[in-house]
Image (tube, rainbow, N blue to C red):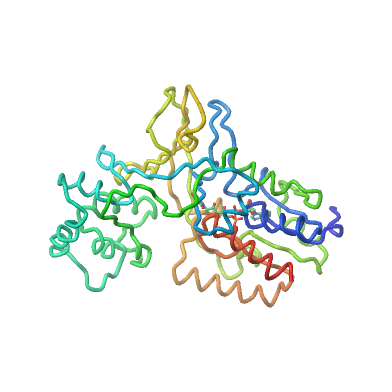
Amino acid sequence: MKDFTKYDYILVGAGFYCSVIAERIANDLNKKVLILEKRKHIGGNCYSEIHQETGIEFHKYGTHIFHTANEEVWAYLSRFTKFNGYYHQVLTVYQGKVYQMPINLETINAFYQVNLKPFEVDEFMKKEHEKEFYEDPKNFEEQAINIVGRPLYEAFIKGYTQKQWERDPKTLPASIIKRLPFRKNYTESYFFDPYQGIPKNDFTDIFNKMLDHPNIEVFLETDFFDVWNDIPKDKTIIYSGAIDKLFNFKYGKLEYRTLEFVEEVIDIEDFQGTSVMNYADADIPYTRIHEPKHLHPEREIKGKTLIIKEFSKESDGTEPYYPIGGQVNNELYNKYLTELNHTYPNLIVGGRLGDYKYYDMHHVIEKALNVYQTKIKI
Ligand SMILES: Cc1cc2nc3c(=O)[nH]c(=O)nc-3n(C[C@H](O)[C@H](O)[C@H](O)COP(=O)(O)OP(=O)(O)OC[C@H]3O[C@@H](n4cnc5c(N)ncnc54)[C@H](O)[C@@H]3O)c2cc1C
């Protein structure tokens, strides 16, 4: 049996949430921390590694691009890495032709074979809306048509959404796309945040640096639920795993979408000329192809390339990625949260699985810094 008495805090999960908190406790409070991580590696879903055959760094759990407008988060992370200045652009293939995404003036002009100026777009779209518009949009499809009109919806959104959710967009709530981006200019940058990029070394290097401290120990391949009973009851535990698992799913399981990634090595130098290409047609089974070498234009990687096809699926519990949300899931989450506060007063729960929320990396880092200040340092 492991000796847990020598640590001041036990943290569960070596993703950004617990790694940031561990780093703060070790450096700022000078207290001892143990991180339990059930996977073979640190870094959570941001983990990256070098592909053996091609020497190309790839993000094992999906392409990750760091971006933020939060200066505190940027300053904090910049202590552990430099960024390469990569800015993200997304393209999409529809019926064999490549268009820019999110829909912008270039997409509109190429799709309709016109040459509109920004100030002509509203008038042009008015004609589409006269053909079809929903005063009270009741589902995803009606909401999307209200924003982009039926032809652009059918081309770029319908098939992709069907693949992403494995459901007819008519059966999805309108709330999913309240903010569907539609640009009346040629802006190509996917994110507007002033700070963005990919870590110059790699994502995992950030975690190695954060956790490299004599006050921090990490036990890999250790599931918290196998050792929970051995941890003294008065220890503060910071948990970034799934909240429903803490209660053995007694009220039911929170639902997630997951992704399957299929790697292929191709004997050419550049397969698609960009890091992420979406596939909008419903009859192409994957949603995206990633080509990770393009995340590091500053690196000279000659020879074969690596591509990764992404397929979207229902999660049966393995690799829960995107919370499905909706009324039933949110009520279930609130039930667990209420019980958590009564049952485990020494447990601080957070991160994307603990809060059952989709967070970007900068959100999680901000949350972790905040929890450290308000619940741990006090
Ligand atoms: C496909 C995909 C693409 C994304 N792309 C971006 C992007 O481009 N930009 C961006 O900013 N964000 C992106 N994100 C979001 C980013 O991955 C998250 O914000 C971040 O990983 C959350 O950190 P976390 O610590 O909360 O969770 P995680 O990184 O998931 O870490 C939680 C850790 O806890 C461990 N764990 C869980 N249960 C136990 C247990 N019982 N015992 C021990 N260990 C346990 C897990 O193994 C995991 O390592 C993306 C997410 C996905 C799914």
- Up-down relation of residue 353 to residue 43 (above or below): below
Work out whether residue 33 or residue 316 is closer to the camera in this orientation and state it: 33
Residue 142: x and y in percent read: 26, 64
Q: Tell me if residue 332 comes above or below residue 28 in the rendering.
A: below
Q: Nearer the viewer, residue 19 or 38?
A: 19
Residue 97 screen position, x and y as percent: 25, 38
Relative depth, front residue between 296 and 1: 296
Which quadrant of the structure image shows residue 75? bottom right
Residue at the spot 73% in from the left edge and 67% down from the top edge? 376
Residue 284 position, x and y percent, is 33, 41
Residue 31 relative to residue 12: left or right: right
Left/right placement of residue 139 relative to residue 365 reads: left
Q: Vertical placement of 179 versus 198: above or below?
A: below
Residue at x 56% of width, y 31% of height: 51
Left or right relative to 153: residue 176: right
Query: Which residue is rendered at x = 64% and y = 41% of the image?
Result: 205
Residue at 71% in and 72% down: 344
Q: In the picture, residue 4 is in which quadrant? A: bottom right
